[in-house]
Amino acid sequence: MAKLQYKRTKSLNIEESTNLFESDVLVDAIVGTGFKGELNTELTNLLEKMNALTAFKIACDVPSAFAFNADVTLTMGALKKSLYLDGVKDIVGEIKVLDLGVHRDLYEKESQTKLLDEKDLLLPYRSKKDSHKGSFGHLSIAHGEMRGASTISALAATRFGCGLVTLITHNTSNSFHHSLMSSSALPHNTTALACGMGLGNAFSDDDLEIFFDNSLPLILDADILAMPTVLKLLKRDKLVLTPHPKEFITLLKLTNLADISIDTLQAERFKYVELFVQKYKNVTLLLKGANVIIAQGEKTFVNPHGSAKLAKGGSGDVLSGLIGALLAQGYSPLNAAIGASLAHTTLAKNYTGTDFSLTPDDLINGIGKL
């Protein structure tokens, strides 16, 4: 086939050159998904020279060895998981799928990995008019040592439709935001729990045991993911975990699944997410990153709409609040994770300020405009 296409290019009087030169369009078709090993010095130098040119750059199938900085990647037949690893987000550019020229039934089968579209976001609109605050759930959040984190989560949950939000704390005399409640005990009408955001050492083992002594839907984030008590919580039926890469490798080690570096995880994110949810089939895992991976059982979803705007302390606490709000309102853990993640990335996209200036308050304020 390659010889045939070469013959056709010759008949079109397309010129050949062994030297690179500036052009309007530069196409990388050097190596594709079948390539293994490392590029030799000659090809490495060639790709470096290609990257230095100002042409509009197109990669065929995948950027060669992920060393070519494409403006557009035209991938063949189907999307490839490797195109959605965090480390290549700045390399692949816009991703488009091309038809292979043969009927899809000949090479395509149903995939358990789905790419999320921004249009998949379903907001928690209130269609029932005969309702009250208790109709929309009650989220209780462990108010830990670094109190700003759980407060951010609580404010995000309130904005995202949760009827009631309570901060569980030993010191209810502290001043709180006027829209939030506080209590030293779990309210009887709680419909979902959130724990970990800024938790620190504020809760003893006995405190945590009391907090978790129920079967309520639960989201865990940050500090709690490194505590031995998480091993008991992994047995719950309705559970969402939202680690960033460092927290996830700690969790993998704690569960005796793997002892790896962050670099190893980032190079094989799908592998380790699937390893985790295959062991804990009841858990919904949301691995944070430039491309968010959400998985439960055999199903995996990728949210590719993240941006560097969200690389700011407190952004993850907003996400936890969004997930907690949906859990409290009766969403399944998987749908809560998907809906909250899409809302989170959409909030960042909608922010009109400079990309470095986004704060958690900006995200929370934007919820009302989704």
Image (spheres, rainbow, N blue to C red):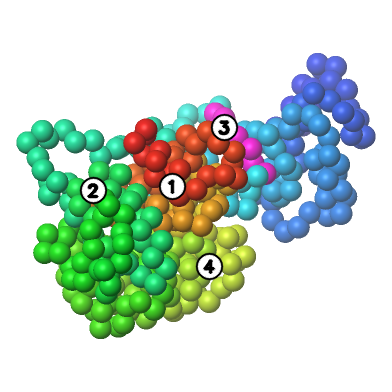
Report helix, strand or loop for mark 1: helix
Q: Separation of disc 4 and disc 2 at Cα?
A: 30 Å
Q: Separation of disc 1 and disc 2 at Cα?
A: 18 Å
Image depth: mark 1 or mark 3 in front: 1
Asked whether the residues under the numbered discs 3 and 2 touch, taking CB atoms below 8 Å apart as contact, a structural biologist would say no
Residue designated by label 4: 246
Asked whether the residues under the numbered discs 4 and 3 touch, taking CB atoms below 8 Å apart as contact, a structural biologist would say no
Residue designated by label 3: 96
Identify the amino acid type marked 2.
Cys
Image depth: mark 3 or mark 2 in front: 2
User: Quick one: label 3 or label 2, which is nearer the N terminus?
Assistant: 3
Asked whether the residues under the numbered discs 1 and 2 touch, taking CB atoms below 8 Å apart as contact, a structural biologist would say no
Q: Height in image: 154 above or below 126?
A: below
Image depth: mark 1 or mark 4 in front: 1
Q: Residue at x 48, y 41 (%)?
A: 348
Question: Percent from the top left, x then y, of residue 14?
Answer: 84, 20
Q: Separation of disc 1 and disc 3 at Cα?
A: 35 Å
Identify the amino acid type marked 1.
Asp
Report helix, strand or loop for mark 3: strand
Magenta range is: 91-100
Residue designated by label 2: 162
Q: Nearer the viewer, residue 139 or 263?
A: 139
Residue lying at the far left in this picture: please name it. 130
Q: Classify residue 12 by image quadrant.
A: top right
Identify the amino acid type marked 4.
Lys
Residue designated by label 1: 361
Q: Residue at x 74, y 37 (%)?
A: 28
